[in-house]
Amino acid sequence: MHQIVTQPIDSTRRWWVLAIVVAAQFMFGVDAFIVNVAIPTIAVDLRATPAQIESVIAIYLIAYATLVVTGGRLGDIHGTRNVFLAGVLGFTLTSLWCGLAQSGLELIIARLAQGATAALMVPQVLATLHLLFTDGQRSRAFAIYGIVLGLAGAAGFLLGGLLTAANLAGTGWRSVFFVNVPSGLVIAFAAWRTMPSVPRRSGTRLDIKGSVVLFAGLLCLIGPLLFGHDLGWTPWLWAVMALGGIILAAFLKLEQAIARTGMPLIDPTLLSDAAFLRGLGAALFFFLANLSFYLVMTLFMQRGLDIPPLAAGMAFLPLALAFVVASRHSGVRARHRGTKVLIEGCAVQIAGLAALALVVGYVDAPSPLLLALTMIIFGYGQGLVMAPLSGAVLSTVKPVAAGSASGIYGTTAQIGNAAGVAAIGAVYFAVEALQSARAGFLISLVLFVTLIMICAAFLSWLRRATA
């Protein structure tokens, strides 16, 4: 049995602690979108290839996805405060490294390190909230957390455009990474002074083998999608992808073996829960069409329509605000109507993508304002799905396995984001090179619609299983 090291938790300043950890989560959320707006400028300045452009985003997500469960375990072993501080300082230093990168390859390596440090920082946020808010104020604390999470996207788009266009002290796109340095230092100092020491769980162990094997499998599976265009899709790339599939299958066997004597990265018993697997399928296909949409939309606006970075970033603001509004609505509606609300959200997303296709297909040079107004529909649909999705996926999981199931869900979401960026990004660049940016964008929209339809099918399947 796990024994808790009894240390009193100082809750007198817990609202200050909430502000600190939520600020860290905000910084992480902003970073995911701020880079999207700056990526075309980064590509030109560093003479980055299409594969390197995609890798700057995807490698960050792969590192985060494979290490986020390990980051949570480290918080159990060494205390959330200590690991949170290490994560914030690491994220700050690696952000500085990203801003100083002199080549596409160096930026990719720096982003890999940044994703790894984010995996230390982010799991401690929810863990701290769970520990400090055990009374009636918990719902208020998590409401604040949810609002800040939603606003991070809007702030990321706006800051990405502003900083890239402002060219502060001649730093150009580099300032989108440098902005994390003062923010991170302030958060780390405040956490060091304010965050309480929290209980540690004795007997908790790391599944290092599982983390390494999962990372290797994902890299082999997704890596060729990133570099296939640059390498001419040689046969050995397909062999590497097949190897990735074999490694991931071996990962599941490894986790089953570790579960007999230790603590695996994921709980294999969850994989026998049919409803949970259907929910994971829905999440995977939803996130395949999530971050990749913003990448392709940004590339098309800046490369295909010659819209400046600031105007491109501003065009996403109405979408982000619609997402926040929908997130607030969907939570209440989902409690009464279940997964039907998520399926309706998928339909709204498809309607938004269809409207976007009509605008791009029939208007020669759509303005940022017209694109922004059209994207509101898609953003509202995304908010209807994303906010209650985790609850729907975890609805059949027993409380004792909730932590492990949440880790699997988070990992699946980031794998979906990374794979979507790699696969749909590869399609966009290939069609752009053969025909035009407009054709590449329209083909990408068809892929997004297909993925969301599959997501809706999984949600309908899940609804039948839980009815």
Image (tube, grey):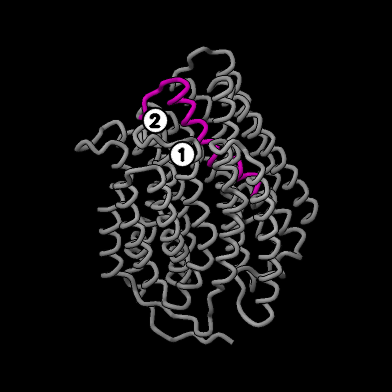
Going 61% across and 43% down the picture, which residue do you hit?
288
Kind of residue at badge 2:
Met
Left or right, 414 with respect to 446, comes to left
Residue located beneath label 1 in the image: 53
Going 34% across and 59% down the picture, which residue do you hit?
19
Circle 2 crowding by C-alpha within 10 Å: few under 14, some 14–19, many from 20: many
Kind of residue at badge 1:
Ile
Examine the rendered structure and indicate whether residue 48 appears above or below residue 369: below
Residues drawn in magenta: 284-309
Left or right, 260 with respect to 298, comes to right
Examine the rendered structure and indicate whether residue 274 appears above or below residue 299: below
In the structure shown, which secondary structural element does the residue marked by tag 2 occupy? helix
Q: Quadrant of residue 194?
A: bottom left
Q: Nearer the viewer, mark 2 or mark 1?
A: 1
Left or right, 37 with respect to 226, comes to left
Q: Which of 371/391 is in front?
A: 371
- In the rendered image, residue 1, in percent from the top left (x then y), is placed at 59, 87
Q: Does the magenta-highlighted stretch encompass residue 303? A: yes
Residue located beneath label 2 in the image: 314
Q: Which of 5/414 is in front?
A: 414
Q: Earlier in the sequence, mark 2 or mark 1?
A: 1
